[in-house]
Image: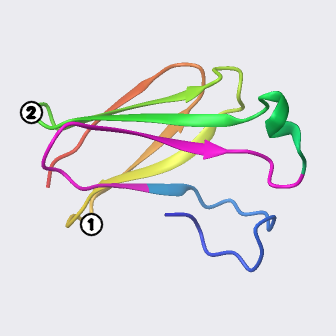
Amino acid sequence: MGPIKQYSDEPTEEPTTFVVYPGADKSSRLYDDDGKSFDYRRGITANVSMDWREAARELTLRVVPITAPPRRFNVRLAGSTKTQRVTLGGEQVVVRLTL
């Protein structure tokens, strides 16, 4: 979930929130480009890879390419109000989520 904006290019300091719905192992990817140009055609994008491991209750996050500038995210488990703040840069981050 992203912060509320009046238009897609509106600057914001609020991080995107990932809400994990547990139940099974899953993988997903958040695709992000600048929203203005055709640079994505040249591969200029940033993607956040997300891997949920149910048994360990862990979400592994990594940004690709690793040269992308650091970004902040909030992560929480569905049904919980407990939120963890994560900064992704060149290293993967493992978040353990419990109710």
Residue 25 rendering spot, x and y as whole percentages: 20, 37
Residue 28 rendering spot, x and y as whole percentages: 41, 40
Image-based side of 23 in relation to 70, left or right: left
Label 2 crowd bin: few (<14), some (14–19), many (20+), radius 10 Å: few
Q: Which residue is drawn at 67% across and 35% down?
A: 46
The residue lying toward the viewer, choosing from 18 and 36, is: 36
Reply above or below: 94 against 12.
above
Image-based side of 82 in relation to 22, left or right: right
Instruction: Point out the image quarter for the C terminus.
Output: bottom left
Q: Mark 1 sits on what residue?
A: 81
Image-based side of 31 in relation to 49, left or right: right
Q: How many labels does the image show?
A: 2
In the picture as drawn, the residue positioned furthest to the bottom comes out as: 6
Image-based side of 34 in relation to 32, left or right: right
In the picture as drawn, the residue positioned furthest to the left comes out as: 55
Kind of residue indicated by mark 1: Thr
In the picture as drawn, the residue positioned furthest to the front comes out as: 41
Q: Distance between the residues labelled 1 and 2?
A: 21 Å
Reply above or below: 33 against 68.
below
The residue lying toward the viewer, choosing from 23 and 78, is: 23
Q: Is mark 2 on a helix, strand or loop?
A: loop
Kind of residue indicated by mark 2: Ala
Query: Which of the 4 image quadrants contains residue 81?
Result: bottom left
Q: Mark 2 sits on what residue?
A: 55
The residue lying toward the viewer, choosing from 61 and 97, is: 61
Q: Which residue is drawn at 57% across and 56% down?
A: 15
Q: Do the residues labelled 1 and 2 touch (CB within 8 Å)?
A: no
Residue 14 rendering spot, x and y as whole percentages: 61, 61
Provide the residue span drawn in magenta.
18-36
Q: Residue at x 73, y 35 (%)?
A: 45
